[in-house]
Image (spheres, helix red, strand yellow):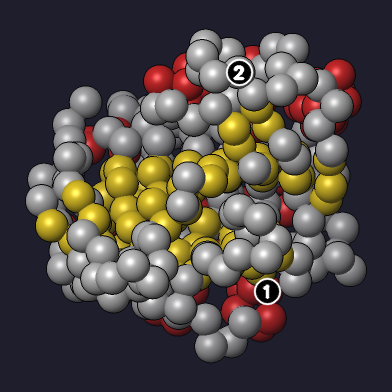
Amino acid sequence: MTIVRKMVNLSLALLVSGCTYVSGGADEEPPLVIDVLDVGQGLSVLFEWDGHYGLFDMGPDSVGVLDTLRNRGVDTLEWVLVSHNHRDHGGGFLELGRQRSSVSETGACEPYIKHLYVGPDTSGGFIRDSIIGIARQNRIPVDTLHQGDELRLGPPTTSGPRFDVLWPPSYRTLGGNGASVVLEVSNGAGNAIFMGDADTTAERELLKLSPTLTVDLLQVGHHGSNGSSSLKFLAQVSPRFAVVSVGARNSYGHPTKEVLQKLFYVTGDSARIHRTDLEGTLKFQLVSGVGVME
């Protein structure tokens, strides 16, 4: 696994492994740390803010996302959001065993999941039913998210980053990639958007709902396939950085040359396009001001 060797001295900062955040004062907000985990041909994104954790998608089963979290010292997840019912996004949830009734201090058990959120995807019955069944066995509350819903990390009374659902709306019945939840994360200084597998149709409708949407960091939809990342969408959101979660030498040819070329057009620099198949797990920060050092 290759470690990213770049650092950007901006409000949205790409961190080198081992970098340290230097606070500007006791009252300054802690950064939101975003780890795009290397799960092969799939997606899993870990958010950490002030000691609280959330997870967007869990990658495919048999990859060991739960082991990865445990090794990182993540003992509790405030929430897990499964964007849609495809195995490369929700399969990791199938590896969840019997949850602890309370958090163990030893950290030897799997992370304790407080809440499961799912999208309104009408397809993928086996995966959907399996995920919901495991959640019920473990007494994990389950709720469905639509455009306009909001998540937080930490106690409700705290400030911190917002997690806003941009797609899909409640008045649409959708299945498959077009039903994938699109999540915007923001903290007042920058924002990131996680597309899951949202396709070009979803992108077009999303722009109608959010016509002024721009983004600092974009998780490229559907692993960089030609079915996502239309030039109109990319030009509108105008990402400063792009990240593709994709498996090495995958049989789908992701990310495609066409998508990479479009990403180059809109970012203006191939060094701002990052891939888990080439660089491994990628770490970003949303920082309330400049404060990143190696």
Mark 1 vs mark 2, foreground winner is: 2
Which residue is the site of mark 2?
104
**Do the residues bearing badges 1 and 2 touch, measured as CB atoms within 8 Å?**
no
Q: Is residue 283 left or right of residue 213?
A: left
Tag 1, which secondary structure? helix
Q: At which x and y percent is residue 76? A: 59, 32
Residue type at mark 1 is Glu
Task: Please provide percent x and percent y for residue 282.
Answer: 30, 43
Question: 10 Å neighbourhood of mark 1: few (<14), some, or many (≥20)?
Answer: some
> Residue 18 appears in which quarter of the rendering?
top left
Question: Is residue 278 at least partly visible in the picture?
Answer: yes
For this rendering, which residue is in front, 277 or 51? 51
User: Within 10 angstroms of label 2, few (less than 14), some, or many (20 or more) residues?
Assistant: some
Can residue 258 be spotted in the picture?
A: no
For the N terminus, the image quarter is top left
Residue under the point 46% across and 52% down: 50
Q: Position of residue 245 (x, y in %)?
A: 40, 41
Q: Quadrant of residue 72?
A: top left
According to the image, label 1 marks what residue?
A: 205
Q: At label 2, which amino acid type do we have? A: Ser
Does residue 250 lie above or below 239 as drawn?
A: above
